[in-house]
Amino acid sequence: MSFRIGIPSIGRTAFAAASIVALALTGCANMPAPVNYSPASTMSATGNVTVADFKYLPASDGKTAPNQLKNTAMGEIKLDKNIDVFFRDAVFKEFRFIGIKVDGTNRTLKGDIKEFLVDDLGYSVTWTVDVHYYVTDSQSGKLVYETDKKTTNKTAKFANVFEALNQQIRSNIEELLKDQDFRKSIN
């Protein structure tokens, strides 16, 4: 005698359909997405800088939440961390990963995230990250370096969103690292 435990074939179809609907509705819910930044730059650099606070300027208007990426399609893209904290932590991790000492020094890096836009209308997604970086002398408060770095990249519509997010941030940080004046300011 054998027993078979399972869902009848009609039940399996209904179960599969219900699972797909539940997954789709979960994706449309405006729940903050849990994110982590994984450093992966192939660059190397030297220097010593304290990575201080960043500001997410789109949230200063009150229309954008501090953890919300601006996007052009319907719905909202919210992270489980505020954008300024997530970006600052990404800079810290990437610098440490490529060889820059981030253990405190007489130089401090700060930044204003002017734009973090996900243009997700159409068949692809265009990511734009625009950051104003500045380095100050910690003792005198004197500005020793400043620049704007704006990066734009395209991804497929249904690409891995978390990897695409990390790549956009990494691209912007790498543009900063390519700047010889920045490197001089932290050495």
Image (cartoon, rainbow, N blue to C red):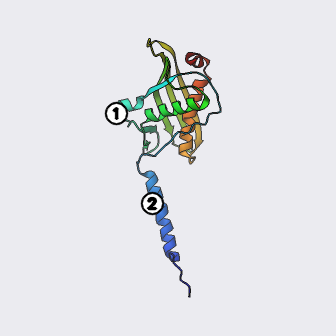
Identify whether 139 is placed above or below 130. Answer: above
Dot 2: element? helix
Relative depth, front residue between 64 and 6: 6
Residue under the image location 59 percent in, 38 percent down: 154
Q: In the picture shown, does residue 11 fall above or below 180? A: below
Read off the residue under disc 2.
Answer: 22
Relative image position of residue 111 (x, y in whole percent): 47, 25
Alpha carbon distance from label 1 to label 2: 32 Å
Looking at the rendered structure, the kind of residue marked 1 is: Gly
Q: Position of residue 28 (x, y in %)?
A: 44, 51
Q: Is residue 144 left or right of residue 58?
A: right
Q: Position of residue 173 (x, y in %)?
A: 56, 29
Q: Residue at x 62, y 33 (%)?
A: 41
Give me the disc on residue 62: 1
Q: Residues within 10 Å of mark 1 (few under 14, many from 20)?
A: few
**Residue that protrudes farthest toward the front in the picture:** 103
Q: Secondary structure at mark 1?
A: loop
